[in-house]
Image: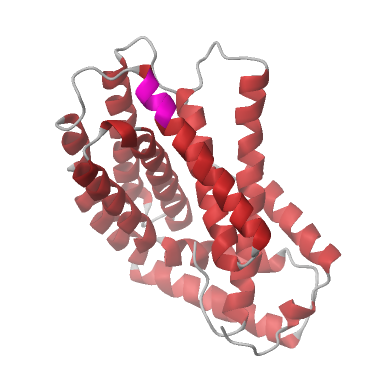
Amino acid sequence: PMTTPTDLDLVDTHTARSAVSRLAAEAAATDSLPPRPPALDWRLPLREAVLRAFAAEIATAQEMTAVAGARPALAVHGFRKALRRAQAVVRLLRPSLPRPVWNEAWRTLGAAARRTSELRDAEVLPTALRRVECKGARLEVLELDLCAHRDQNRASGEAEARLRQGVAQLQRLPELLDGSLPAELPRTALQKGLVDIYRRAWKAWETAQKRPNHALIHDWRKRCKDLRHAAELLLSDHAKGDARRWVEQLAPLTRELGAVTDFIALRVWARGGSGTS
């Protein structure tokens, strides 16, 4: 890691927390993707319901390529959100899939997400920087650099190209899962998958508490996203009380962690590196 001091290093704790709060609030307010219930259709046999949910996310990712040229920020956001939801399905199915099939599906989804990480940062970080209430010549230069990088990506059509590359790899996954799942999928299998996701999120939190750094906080955020999307997928329309409140609390948690990692990514950029999402 580079150690060159930056104006962001001089931001006090209160200012940093205020910036994180504003970023999280803005993320909640500006998510302009069409609302769509992510829950399983419990009227169907469970195997069919899970496969339909997975195929719907792959289709959503493909739909984002059509708007990538005109609205790259929305397209990248929608593409990555669909991938996160698809990953949640694959996580839930881990006890039910042969290990080679699970590994292939997970690697393919992860590779498609990583292909768009730099695009996501290029769209988000200029806005994140403007939410930091401090001034300085280096920050002004940083903002110009971030905006120039974003504008270059937009002008080159990079978002559409990378999304199409990712979709080309994703299209075979629904058939792969369909041919690998057992004929009958019991609810206990998904319960085991959810418990595994929860334990991974808890372990990531414990690790980040002991050794807080960018990579570990980012990993905790990803594990929380897995848990959020898996829980939303399994949430019945009839669920209420503690179960529904617990699931609803996961959304603001993941947004706040996203704001924290954006702030850290800004410091990495300011020191001459690049952020990672």
**Residue 104 visible in the snapshot:** yes
Q: Position of residue 213 (x, y in %)?
A: 62, 67
Q: Position of residue 192 (x, y in %)?
A: 41, 29
Colouring style:
secondary structure
Farthest bottom residue?
4
Dominant SS in magenta: helix
* Magenta region: 188-192
Q: Quadrant of residue 129?
A: bottom right
Residue pictured at 18% horizontal, 19% vertical: 183
Q: Quadrant of residue 49?
A: top left
* 170 is higher (above) or lower (below) than 111: above
Name the foreground residue: 58 vs 95.
95
**Residue 38 visible in the snapshot:** no
* 41 is higher (above) or lower (below) than 71: above
Q: Is residue 254 left or right of residue 188?
A: right
Residue pictured at 75% horizontal, 67% vertical: 132
Residue pictured at 47% horizontal, 39% vertical: 197
Q: Position of residue 19 (x, y in %)?
A: 75, 61
Name the foreground residue: 31 vs 225.
225
Residue pictured at 25% horizontal, 35% vertical: 97
> How many discs appear?
0
**Residue 189 covered by magenta stretch:** yes
Q: Is residue 99 left or right of residue 273?
A: left
Name the foreground residue: 85 vs 56.
85
